[in-house]
Image: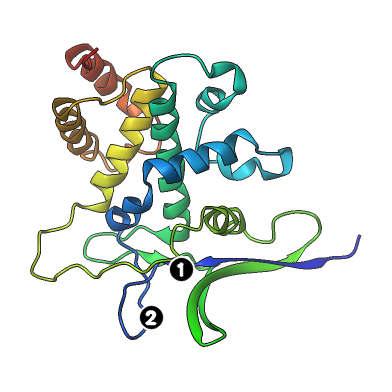
């Protein structure tokens, strides 16, 4: 079998500045995960083919993926559950594209990904790209993430750069903890419906963000999740 060159590109998230500046702030990037975008991602998950499954299975468990099957359309909270799980998947994709920073370091671009500025007529666009030689497999580990971001097309419009003197951004680990917690809870039927629910979920995120390895395994947080569900039954 001969090798072929495969390249995946997508719009890069950039600030609305004269010179391209890549957005790596996870909290800001997640603002593009609107209900409409999450519903679009849900459709992509539901229509996935065997060859495209890796990107989904790498961030959601088999039990979580079952919520997207066509025989799970019944239930008042199924849309909310799917959105929470899709948001978790989106976060996983972002953290595979942008390596989370540690201590005072800012997040950085995955070494398998580069960014380029290309001209389209009179307009210039900044793109993320990855690729290489393929023998029928994915040329890089980052290839599925860029492929999916291209399908979602969430970064066509630039981001407004936050005021340096504005509010202190939430730490990336807390943001990731909140998204992961929402997915874990959704898979067990708990979905935030009220302001009180969302406030309780935010407090849980800070609790889960304490251990550095909370994202490494569900078991490390299972007791905390159980206690949360018992103490924070969502409104009917």
Which image quadrant for residue 84? top left
Q: Position of residue 103 (x, y in %)?
A: 23, 60
**For the point 60% across and 16% down, which residue is it?**
71
Q: Quadrant of the N terminus?
A: bottom right
Tell me if residue 49 comes above or below residue 149 in the rendering: above
Tell me if residue 139 comes above or below residue 75 in the rendering: below
N-term-proximal mark, 1 vs 2: 1
Q: Position of residue 101 (x, y in %)?
A: 31, 61
User: 26 or 122: nearer the eye?
Assistant: 122
Q: Which residue is mark 1?
A: 12
User: 17 or 60: nearer the eye?
Assistant: 17
Q: Position of residue 92 (x, y in %)?
A: 44, 46
Q: Position of residue 34 (x, y in %)?
A: 36, 45
Badge 2 element: loop
**For the point 21% across and 65% down, which residue is it?**
104
Structure colour scheme: rainbow
For the residues bearing labels 1 and 2, Cβ distance under 8 angstroms: yes
**For the point 34% across and 64% down, which residue is it?**
24
Q: Which residue is mark 2?
A: 20
Binning the other alpha carbons within 10 Å of mark 2 as few (below 14), some (14 to 19) or many (20 upward) gives: some
Q: Is residue 205 visible?
A: yes
**For the point 40% across and 47% down, which residue is it?**
91
Which image quadrant for residue 193? top left
Badge 1 element: loop
In three-dimensional space, the C-alpha distance between marks 1 and 2, rounded to whole angstroms, equals: 10 Å
Extreme front residue here? 122
């Amino acid at each position: 079998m001969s090798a072929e060159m495969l390249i995946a590109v997508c719009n890069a998230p950039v600030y609305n500045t004269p010179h391209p500046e890549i957005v790596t702030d996870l909290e800001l990037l997640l603002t593009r995960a609107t209900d409409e975008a999450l519903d679009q991602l849900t459709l992509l998950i539901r229509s996935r083919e065997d060859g495209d499954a890796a990107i989904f299975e790498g961030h959601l468990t088999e039990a979580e993926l079952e919520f997207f099957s066509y025989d799970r359309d019944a239930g008042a909270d199924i849309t909310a559950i799917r959105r929470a799980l899709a948001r978790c998947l989106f976060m996983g994709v972002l953290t595979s594209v942008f390596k989370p920073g540690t201590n005072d370091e800012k997040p950085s671009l995955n070494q398998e990904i580069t960014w380029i500025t290309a001209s389209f007529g009179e307009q210039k666009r900044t793109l993320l790209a990855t690729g290489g030689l393929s023998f029928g497999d994915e040329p890089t580990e980052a290839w599925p993430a860029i492929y999916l971001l291209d399908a979602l097309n969430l970064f066509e419009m630039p981001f407004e750069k936050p005021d340096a003197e504005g509010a202190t951004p939430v730490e990336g680990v807390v943001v990731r903890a909140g998204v992961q917690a929402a997915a874990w809870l959704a898979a067990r039927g708990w979905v935030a419906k009220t302001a009180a629910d969302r406030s309780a979920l935010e407090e849980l995120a800070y609790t889960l963000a304490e251990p550095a390895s909370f994202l490494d395994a569900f078991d490390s947080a299972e007791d905390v999740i159980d206690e949360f569900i018992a103490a924070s039954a969502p409104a009917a």
